[in-house]
Image (spheres, helix red, strand yellow):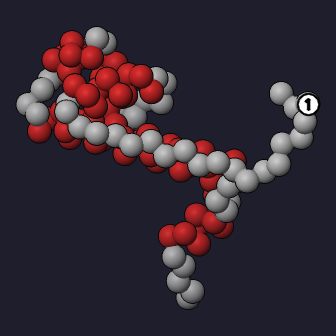
Amino acid sequence: MKTMTFDEIKDKYLGTKGTPERDAYELELKVEVLGEMIKQIRKERHLTQEELGKLVGVNKSQISKLERNTKNVTVATILKIFRAIKANIKFSVERYEEKLEKGMA
C-alpha cells in the first residue's frame, strides 16, 4: 500500500495549485477557518453575537452566518469585525506571472 502526503492527495483529487478547482478549495478552506477564528476570538472577548453585531453595525444573524462560514460577506465587514474584537487580520494577494495582451479588458 502506497502512502501519500496530504498535498499529493489534493493534487490528485482537486488538481494542482493554480487550477480553478484547487483555488476554489483553498479559498473555501480559508473562509471556513476565518469564521471559526472570529467565533473563537469573540468568545474570548466575552461578546455575544448581538453585541459584536452592534459594534460592527450589522445584525446578529450576519455574525452568525459568518461564523458558520457563509461566503457572502464583504471585506469591509470582515475588517470591521476584527477591529471590534481588537484583532489583526492580514490579507495576502498573489500576482500571477502571466503576460497581458494589449487591448484586453
Q: Report the side of 80 relative to 97 (left or right).
A: left
Along the viewing direction, whichever of 59 and 86 lies nearer the viewer:
86
Q: In the image, what residue type sits under mark 1?
A: Gly
Question: In the image, what residue occupies the spot 40% across and 34% down?
Answer: 69
Quarter of the image for residue 47 reads top left
Along the viewing direction, whichever of 23 and 100 lies nearer the viewer:
100
Question: In the image, what residue occupies the spot 19% across and 33% down?
Answer: 86
Name the spot of residue 91 as percent of width and height, x first.
44, 42
Along the viewing direction, whichever of 97 and 37 lies nearer the viewer:
97
100 shown above or below 8:
above
On-image quarter of the C terminus? top right
Count of marks placed on residues: 1
Question: In the image, what residue occupies the spot 41% across and 22% down?
Answer: 76
Residue 21 visible: no
Name the spot of residue 48 as percent of width and height, x first.
14, 23
Quarter of the image for residue 40 reads top left
Residue that sits furthest to the left in the current view: 46
Residue that sits furthest to the bottom in the current view: 1
Residue that sits furthest to the front in the current view: 102
Name the spot of residue 80 as percent of width and height, x first.
31, 23
Question: In the image, what residue occupies the spot 53% across and 50% down?
Answer: 26
**Which residue bears the numbered disc 1?**
103
Name the spot of residue 12 as percent of width and height, x first.
65, 67
- Find numbered disc 1 in the image and state the secondary structure of the residue it sits on: loop
Q: Residues within 10 Å of mark 1 (few under 14, many from 20)?
A: few
30 shown above or below 12:
above
Along the viewing direction, whichever of 1 and 95 lies nearer the viewer:
95
